[in-house]
Image (cartoon, rainbow, N blue to C red):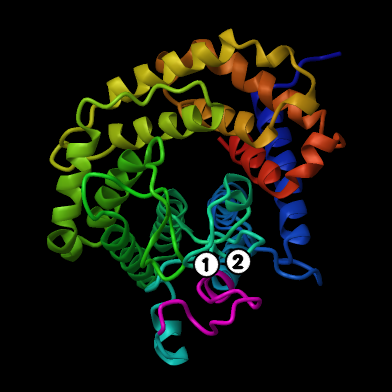
Amino acid sequence: MMQQTPFEQNETRLNQAMKLMNNFLISTGVKGARPSKRYLWTDALAVENLIQLELKTGEQAFTEYALELIDMVHNQLGKFDAKDKRKGWISTLSNGEAKIRPTAGGLRIGKPKLERAIGESFSSIDEWDRDGQYFHYLTRWVDALLLVGSVTNDGKYQFWAADLCHVTMKAFIKDLRIPWKMSIDLKRPLISDQGATDPLDGLITIIKVCLAVPELKKELKEFKLVLQRLCRNTSWVSADPLGIGRLLISAHQVKNFPNSESKGLDWKDLLAQACVGIDHFLEAEILNFPAGKRLAFRECALAHGIKYWHNEPRFLEKYFPLADELESFWLNEMNSDSWKDHEEINCVTLAASLLN
């Protein structure tokens, strides 16, 4: 069999990404007649993928789906769950005001169970399925809104991103610790432990917002200083493929920031720590496990992080075959139970990798 040319390979990857995103749009109710099924982290990456698809194909329909998805997220996750006795927008703004500022109260995660009530005992098992607000999910949605604003030249998306960034930092950064999970009204921590990379995610998000909306620098300055302190001399090494993938993307973003904005962040150090994490992942020999003992979205996130550097191969070239192997494995396992158990998030993470 003749080998595909680089152009043919890129076309194949693009077609695979389009199929995956089409599956996501249908299964989560963005396209077609199924009920809307929203989950903030997944939707944030989906918005970014759809924008990338238009940039690569020129088909405006992809951006139209991205904008529709944003509205669906705001109208669903910006409001209390239908099962909640509280009604309306979680910002408590009137309907008219909330439509102008849909992110002013943050956004729910989209978990199936209501958040833990005041006085209710904590259960680590139940808490995983309970709603609330996650710091790192909110920062991901800020990223998605900033991207859409830059591509569409519509300032409302930057405004929504800035609004969400400010309310997030104000609610989560109370001292030198960032609660991993807050209540929907952002008044109490549900999980006080700090997420592994929350300070780094937060600092990068503030830098991006300040570059897009410079007039917010003064309001975010105190939070930026806290995050810089939390990031100082911190180890980000992890064997978790999802975390490694995110660290690779963070390193690339920091590399492209103006030096005046990235004080306290060394992209080369972030990249080196991510590479240590990749080596730990490989040492665990997970690649030898069957699909049933692996999680596609975590591994595809690692492939995505590696492929983020595809235009600068001198930094990560030795790991490119790993990204290819992970993509190929999961493209061949899409009928497995492991894939179907987390189908929506698997679709968007694999598509993200294929689009790089």
User: In which image quadrant can residue 83 be found?
Assistant: bottom right
Which callout, 2 or 1, points to the residue nearer the camera? 1
Residue range highlighted in magenta: 74-92
Residue at mark 2: 114
Labelled disc at residue 134: none
Quadrant where the N terminus is found in the figure: top right
Q: Are marks 2 and 1 in contact (CB under 8 Å)?
A: yes
Question: In the rendered image of this protein, does residue 209 appear above or below residue 67?
Answer: above
Residue name at image x 58 percent, y 27 percent: 303
- In percent of the image, x 65 and y 37: which residue is there? 297
* Residue position for label 1: 117
| Residue at 85 percent of width and 34 percent of height | 336
Question: Does dot 1 land on a helix, a strand or a loop?
Answer: loop
76 displayed left or right of 179:
right
Q: Amino acid at mark 1?
A: Ala
Residue 262 visible? The answer is: no
Q: Which quarter of the figure has residue 115?
A: bottom right
Lateral position of residue 323 relative to residue 140, left or right:
right
At mark 2, the secondary structure is loop
